[in-house]
Amino acid sequence: MPGELDLNHANLDDENIPIAYAVALPKFIAMSLSTLGVYWLFWSFRAYRNLGLSKAASGVYAFFLTISLYELLKRVEFAAKKANLSVSMSKIPLALTFFVLETANRFLDKDGKWPFWLTLLLASLPVLPMIMVQRRINAVNAALRPNLPLVSRLNGLNIAWLSIFTIVICLCLVGSMLPQEPTP
């Protein structure tokens, strides 16, 4: 069945392919916060592709990251165990925390009565468990792929995303602080 753990995983033996997606924490945090989690679509797609899934399966898992994060952690832990590396992924707490924070972010304040800063704060909370996920992925890569560097450089597309999302967020913050005219 597509997407199941493959015990004869071809990418695990290839020293040129990182385990999941090894990105430096400053870049990960900047991209996650400035895009309010949109970056995770790209990040999780790359992680699943590096773990040997097809483009279609990786796309589906990336789109549903809120409920598929546990699967990603399971695959990274499997890669570590196959290499006799003792690593605790805390799969269930991390996946559950991410699920609760993402779900709360999506379903709270549907009537738009909360201040924008509170909504923005809620939108940024899911980055906390994702930072722990990325730290564990980087630790596994440091042990199993010591010659592969972390992706830390911001390319032109990253800078464009950072700029656009940051400007939009700042404009929304300013707009939320302006006095509103009463509606008749």
Image: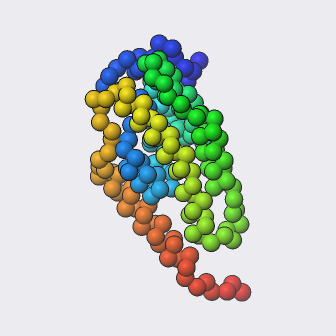
Q: Nearer the viewer, residue 53 or 32?
A: 32
Q: Residue at x 37, y 61 (%)?
A: 163
| Residue 53 makes an appearance in the image | no
Q: Relative to 1, is 63 above or below?
A: below
Q: Quadrant of residue 18?
A: top left
Q: Is residue 95 visible?
A: yes
- In this rendering, the answer to whether 176 lies above or below 124 is below
Query: On the rendered structure, is 176 left or right of 84?
Result: right
Residue 15 in the image, given as x and y percentages of width and height: 32, 22
Q: Residue at x 45, y 18 (%)?
A: 84
Q: Position of residue 110 (x, y in %)?
A: 70, 62
Percent of width and height locating residue 154 = 31, 50
Q: Is residue 106 left or right of 159 when viewed as pictured?
A: right
Q: Residue 160's quadrant in the figure? A: bottom left
**Identity of the residue furthest to the top in this view:** 8
Q: Position of residue 133 (x, y in %)?
A: 50, 40
Seen as rendered, the residue at the extreme front is: 86
Disc tally is 0
Q: Residue at x 34, y 20 (%)?
A: 14
In the rendered view of the protein, which quadrant contains the N terminus? Answer: top right
Q: Residue at x 38, y 31 (%)?
A: 141
